[in-house]
Amino acid sequence: MLVDACVLYPTLLRNIVLGVARTGAFTPFWSARIIEEWRRAALRTHPEQAAALAGEIALTGVAWPEALVDVPPDAEAALSLPDENDRHVLAAAIATDADLILTLNLRDFPGRTLARYGVRVEHPDPFLLALYREGGAPVAAAVTAQTDAAAAAIDPVPDQRALLKKSRLPRLAKAIAGRGAGI
């Protein structure tokens, strides 16, 4: 599965997605350009955290050394998407034989176009919700670990459901809260 930059930043969403990946539920992939987009987006919001961000990116690379996809330089040329800047995401998915692009920007990846390449697009909320429903405990544990870590840095401490909603994971938040896991 190819992970788009908008899933890698913001931090909590990235940590939840990669925390679930650590359970073995899926293998994430990305390109150097996606990592650079993550870096630029984070620095726009928090330029003072450049060193910490460099460390996060390095640790992510160490945790998933096989995740970095080499995209041939001309791979984007034949692709057409509503936003030309997203062609590299599809090119990276094709280069790694990924059947899924995980992104918040569903409109930028028309299903008909992606289907030509055997790729589909999904928002992190229904994707993680489906994994939770398939095997709840590991997903709930990964989500709880990440939300607990995030909550520890915030005063007053928000509840898990609020953190998940803020991370654009409202359906996952409702499902986990409904089972009483992690709250």
Image (spheres, rainbow, N blue to C red):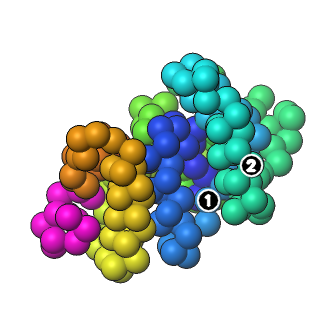
Q: Is residue 65 visible?
A: yes
- Is residue 176 left or right of 40 when viewed as pictured? left
Which tag, 1 or 2, sits closer to the chain's start?
1
The one of 134 and 14 positioned closer to us in this rendering:
14
- Is residue 24 left or right of 123 when viewed as pictured? right
Q: How many discs appear? A: 2
Kindly identify which residue carries mark 2: 58
Kindly identify which residue carries mark 1: 28
Q: Quadrant of residue 154?
A: top left
In magenta, the rendered stretch is: 170-183
Q: Quadrant of residue 61?
A: bottom right
Q: Position of residue 103 (x, y in %)?
A: 48, 43
Kindly report the distance in space between the C-alpha atoms of the residues bearing marks 1 and 2: 15 Å
Q: Is residue 124 above or below residue 77?
A: below
Which quadrant does the N terminus fall into?
bottom right
Whether 108 is among the magenta residues is no
Q: Is residue 123 visible?
A: no
Which quadrant does the C terminus fall into?
bottom left
Q: Quadrant of residue 44?
A: top right
Q: Residues within 10 Å of mark 1 (few under 14, many from 20)?
A: many
